[in-house]
Image (spheres, rainbow, N blue to C red):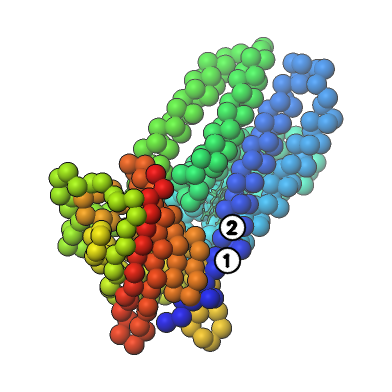
Amino acid sequence: MNLAATLAPTAYWYLARGTGAVALVLLTGSVVLGIVGSVRFAAPRWPRFAIDTVHRDLSLLVLVVLAIHVITSILDGFAPITLLDGVVPFATPYRPLWMGLGTLAFDLLLAIAITSLVRRRLGYRAWRAIHWLAYASWPVAVLHGLGTGSDIKQWWMLGLTVACIVAVLVAVWARLAHVSGEHAGLRAPATALAVITPIGLAIFTLAGPLQQGWARRAGTPKSLLGRPGPAASPGGAVSPPAGSSALPASFTATLGGAVSESQASGGAVVNLAMRVSGQVRGRLRVRIGGVPIGAGGGLSMTGSQVDLALAGRPSVLQGQIAALQGEDFDARLSDAAGTTVDVRAQLQIDSQTNTVTGILSGSRVS
Ligand code: HEM
């Protein structure tokens, strides 16, 4: 089996994640300007024309970026997402709820764009009612990003999402401060909603996406999961002996185990399940998703998951492949206790017997 030189993350994967983050920021900007634009009636000094123009242009840009986001998610091929999943919510087998929310938000925005084009024929009142959907699409999109994004555990993505939420909250609170006349009765329920929503999102994020095992709970198909924790690992081989949880500053161990490959829509997943024995003991599991390149059996890597469960350590060290050369790879792994370790695996894969042997070396970073 040649995982080798041909393995490199596809640009689609980075683009899908990058455009997701950009779409969220642009959508937030558009929603904030929409809210600020409506405050202008109470504060007429604000430049109405400028706000409207930027709001409209930003909204169009959101649709363009989202089109790229959807197309790159499909082309990436790691997750089974089709063109239909871009418009029909909750149909995909891949994290159906969280992906479905993204599709729903996209559909709501498409509805707004289409009705804006025929605004004259529709009449102002009907158009405006539909336009309110823009506000609904924003929290739905935030939930999608939190629920399915692979970067939410990174400080920058979490910070970006929090910043978007704060921006909309500030705009909503400013808007509520200007509510008067016939709409004054709306102030109390709207304020309650503006307080409850961020609290709900915070509780959801802490209890869900930031917890270990979220990928499974989120509905990732089994064939794409590469992370059985110690309790779930076959044979329960890594029950922690008391008092032995310290990880050496550096270590070397031998690897031995099995290789299997399964087909996923648009590509394949290579699964390496290995025993670790030597200065540390336990299990190393590596999953590499990729799309085949050429006839030589090579794969272009679209995603990876590395799990190192060591005897004496209650939580699994997890991470992704950072560099892959031939059949060797480097990865930075960390666990819930804040331990980070850089590992290098030098592997020999025998595709006749579907076995793998090799050396694992590691050094603690923190
Ligand atoms: C208003 C609509 C949408 C917004 C604002 C949005 C935004 C986002 C954000 C912020 C992320 C997290 C990115 C990260 O963690 O780096 C994300 C992830 C993702 N989105 Fe969307 N999205 C939308 C609709 C869609 C649609 C319609 C699809 C395709 C059917 C889609 C497919 C994906 C996929 C596959 C991921 C996971 C990428 C990964 O982290 O590996 N999104 N999206």
Residue 87: image x %, image y %? 58, 56
Disc 1 crowd rating (10 Å Cα; few below 14, some 14-19, many 20+) is some
Say what amino acid the circle numbered 1 marks: Thr
Does residue 227 appear anywhere in the picture?
no
Report crowding for label 2: few under 14, some 14 to 19, many 20 or more residues within 10 A (C-alpha): some
Residue bearing mark 2: 14
On screen, residue 280 above or below 56: below
Question: Does residue 137 lie above or below 272 as drawn?
Answer: above
Q: Quadrant of residue 271?
A: bottom left
Q: Distance between the residues labelled 1 and 2?
A: 7 Å
On screen, residue 70 versus residue 233, left or right, reads: right
Can residue 65 be seen here? yes
Indicate whether 56 appears above or below 226.
above
Q: On the image, which quarter does residue 162 sit in?
A: top right
Q: Which residue is drawn at 64% across and 37% down?
A: 28
**Percent x, y for residue 274?**
29, 68
Q: Which residue is drawn at 74% across and 41% down?
A: 58
Q: Where the C terminus falls, by quadrant? A: top left
**Is disc 2's CB within 8 Å of ligand 1?**
no
Q: Which of 20 and 300 is in front in this view?
A: 300
Q: What secondary structure is found at the residue carrying circle 1?
A: loop
What residue sits right under mark 1 in the picture? 10
Residue 320: percent from left, percent from top: 44, 58
Q: Is residue 155 left or right of residue 18?
A: left
The answer to whether the residue labelled 1 contacts the one labelled 2, judged by CB atoms less than 8 Å apart, is yes
Nearest the eye: 258 or 151: 258
Say left or right for 108 vs 234: right
Please name the amino acid that badge 2 sits on. Answer: Tyr
- Residue occupying the far left of the picture: 242
Does residue 122 lie above or below 82 as drawn? above
Q: In the drawing, what numbered circle is on residue 79?
A: none
